[in-house]
Amino acid sequence: MISPALYWVMTGNDFTLDINNPASPKILVVGNNPDRQNIYSAALGLYNSRIVKLINKKKQLKSSVIIDELPTIYFRGLDNLIATARSNKVAVCLGFQDFSQLTRDYGEKESRVIQNTVGNVFSGQVVGETAKTLSERFGKVLQRRQSVSINRQDV
């Protein structure tokens, strides 16, 4: 443990990570510091892995795991969480800029599994391979259109 503050947080026993426990529900917000990403990512990864195991069970409260800037932290078991969470009333929302970031930080195989397992995709403007992949995923949408033309000779 590189930081006394991190050591202090991780050695306490006053808080459990079963955030959707009906007897003791909690809200947990965890953030990363970009300047110390390499230091904190291991600790955050440990917490994330443990939380996934605890919340992805039957007979728990509805819950949500929202991860922004996913490539900045490794989330072990994420592919399994996405695949099984819905049946356990856990919603998973992932945010990242581009599929290439996911591939870079999670590897080709795991990145593909994550990309292919998610159900709903919201996207802003992207380019390159991500744009091509999303275009193939969304497919073509046939829309019915109607136009009206007015032509007057006396104008």
Image (tube, helix red, strand yellow):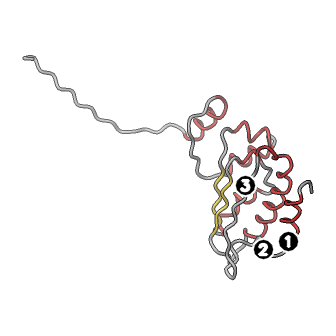
| Residue type pointed to by label 3 | Gly
Quick one: which residue is furthest to the left in this view? 154
**155 sits to left or right of 115:** left
Q: Position of residue 91 (x, y in %)?
A: 63, 62
Q: Label 3: which residue?
A: 31
Residue at the image point whose x is 86% and y is 49% from the top? 39
Q: Label 1: which residue?
A: 12
Picture quadrant where residue 10 is located? bottom right
Residue at the image point whose x is 65% and y is 35% from the top? 130
Mark 1 vs 3, N-terminal side: 1
Density class for disc 2 (Cα within 10 Å; few <14, some 14-19, many ≥20) is few
- Secondary structure under the numbered disc 1 in the rendered image: loop
Assign the N terminus to one quadrant of the image.
Answer: bottom right
**5 sits to left or right of 129:** right
Q: Label 2: which residue?
A: 15
Whole-angstrom CA distance, mark 3 to mark 2, is: 17 Å
Mark 3 vs 2, N-terminal side: 2
